[in-house]
Image: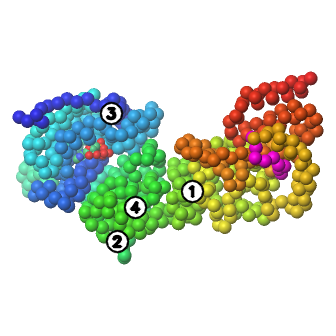
Amino acid sequence: MTVDARKETRGFQTEAKQLLHLMIHSLYSNKEIFLRELVSNASDAADKLRFEAVSNSDLYEGDADLKIRISFDKEAKTLTISDNGIGMSREEVIENLGTIAKSGTAQFMQKLTGDQKKDSQLIGQFGVGFYSAFIVADRVVVTTRRAGLPADQAVRWECTGEAEFTVESVEKAERGMTVELHLKDDALEFADHWRLRSIIKKYSDHIAIPVVMQKQTPVGDTEKVELEDEVINTATALWTRSRSDVTDEEYKEFYKHISHDYAEPLSWSHNRVEGNLDYTSLLYIPAQAPFDLYNRDASRGLKLYVQRTFIMDDAEQFLPLYLRFIKGVVDSNDLSLNVSREILQKDPNIDAMRSALTKRVLDMLSKMAKSEPENYTTFWKEFGQVIKEGPAEDFSNREKIAKLLRFASTHTDTAEQNQSLEDYVARMKDGQEKIYYIAAENFNTAKSSPHLEVFRKKGIEVLLLSDRVDEWLMSHLQEFEGKNFQDVGKGELDLGKLDSDEEKQAQEKVAEQLKPLLERVKSALGENVSDVRITHRLTDSPACVVVGQFDLGAQMRRILEAAGQKVPESKPIFELNPEHPLVKKLEAEANDSRFSDLTHVLFDQANLAEGAQLQDPAAYVQRLNKLLLELSH
Ligand code: ADP
């Protein structure tokens, strides 16, 4: 006996135990999905065998007829799912069936809400398919042999859904994997031919290899019956069928198979491209973002097939990063079966496919935005932030992406991001040349910013930006339909034709008159400001701070600093509202000390309104209190 043959007992990781427990106790509402998960795994295993056999046909061991077999024994209360796919070695069994979903399990556990319905959706999304066996079984026995290994190097894995599992070496003549489920008493309904048949039809019809069950047929007029194999599913790769032959239900189930998502997709697009390049693509837009959308090393990309043979998961070369949430399949007739990730990176044909697929997704989205606005709203909530990465990454599609963007704006004044740039442009005032926006740390700061006062007074719409990526996005967008973007918190206010000539003359006159005041304020604030000037952007507030036209905005500055970058220092411009009583009071103030206090208080307040932190909050409080006391005398 070799050392390997020893029976060993191993414990699950802590998170795995919790997850297993949750799985067993919370997925009761939809028990039958365990079969979909196990059949889906068996089909993946067949894909993997075909792929490895491209370079080593010995792996077929003389049997290239891949299938999945389902059988049951009512008396023994067992249900068995077998495949002749790639199988697993002992190490692979321990790695794949002993860890539960590997990376990110702890992160996932934190997302659970306690709401069974929501949690069970999350579980599906997390891809713990195999363990769904424990929804219906209190004991699961897996026997498996990896293709190419000798018969005595098969493995038996057994688990009762508790903290431990055992592995031992056994003999198995056929390669592949057999899962034997010992059904719980409340799951005996699954030891039934018609029930199983209908579940397979419902969830697994799209599986590309045959799913087989034995059927009893009477022999002539005798009492005898004969057992006959019956293929339950359609058993052709779904994307090879013509669109009109595939029902919506089938498209949806196929999505669940490839994405491990419980929820239905929002939309899909199935296309055959012929000519220079010859390929089929089936792309899906999910309805919910995966929990690891922002993980740098989260899996992304399409499933790649070459002439119906599975080549790899997560082929990320076919779509840009900002479309990383798209799920789907691409099946090429041009690529070699030996294609590798390295080759994909260099192949110029891949670039052509990538731009075609990118265009397809963008078209799908703009179609959804027009004809299914509710779905688009859902989409934007889940993936809008990622789409905002688009203009920077994909310059050539900038205009298309810009049309997909949605923003909050002073048009509605709600935090909901539901205004498009096209809507904005259609509402622009006569003589308005720019698209105005404000960027702040959060929605309320943006919405209440003093910078908006003159815009509100004149009824000019301003986009309210408060996502982390927004300023960065704007720096790449630059213009939309020939209109430049202008941050209302940056540079000198120039409303162009929106201000009349009389208004402009009056403004210049006031600026001239108040020159002495501005000098005095400037010397009181010293190093804190780069300039002090009169403004007409304010109606209610006495003052505000502005960033130079070419300086970094506050949001961008914070992002860069957080990333450890050195950001050049820039001082704000302090602007005063000449109409405001406090500014008039300041002008009339003869006492230098009180002038300085009031100036500093106004300056600090202007910074607070921007959502900034004060350099010396205690000094602000002291000055303010001093002024309050004087008031009461
Ligand atoms: P997922 O399928 O999401 O990776 P599962 O828990 O369903 O997660 O399966 C874990 C792993 O176990 C799979 O990734 C695969 O490597 C292996 N596995 C599961 N079922 C089979 C099978 N029938 N044949 C070979 N390997 C399998």
The part of the image, by quadrant, that contains residue 405 is bottom right
Q: State whether residue 23 is above or below residue 530.
A: above
Q: Which residue is mark 3?
A: 16
- Mark 1 vs mark 2, foreground winner is 2
On the image, the x and y values in percent for residue 40 come to 28, 49
On the image, the x and y values in percent for residue 578 come to 88, 46
Q: State whether residue 228 is above or below residue 607.
A: below
Amino acid type, callout 4: Phe
Task: Tell me which label, 3 or 1, sits earlier in the chain.
Answer: 3
Task: Tell me which label, 1 or 4, sits earlier in the chain.
Answer: 4
Real-space CA distance between mark 2 and mark 3, rounded to the nearest whole angstrom: 44 Å
Amino acid type, callout 2: Asp
Q: Which residue is mark 2?
A: 278
Crowd class of label 4 (few under 14; some 14 to 19; many from 20; radius 10 Å): many
Q: Which residue is mark 4?
A: 318
Task: Tell me which label, 3 or 4, sits earlier in the chain.
Answer: 3
Residue at x 46% of width, y 63% of height: 358
Q: Which residue is mark 1?
A: 373
Query: Which SS class for mark 1?
Result: helix
Crowd class of label 1 (few under 14; some 14 to 19; many from 20; radius 10 Å): some
Real-space CA distance between mark 1 and mark 2, rounded to the nearest whole angstrom: 33 Å
Q: Nearer the viewer, residue 268 or 582?
A: 582
Specify whether tag 4 is near ligand 1 (CB below 8 Å): no
Residue at x 63% of width, y 61% of height: 478
On the image, the x and y values in percent for residue 484 come to 68, 62
Q: Nearer the viewer, residue 126 or 549?
A: 549
Real-space CA distance between mark 4 and mark 2, rounded to the nearest whole angstrom: 15 Å
Q: Quadrant of ligand 1?
A: top left
Query: Which SS class for mark 3?
Result: helix
Real-space CA distance between mark 1 and mark 4, rounded to the nearest whole angstrom: 27 Å
Magenta segment: 528-536
Task: Tell me which label, 4 or 2, sits earlier in the chain.
Answer: 2
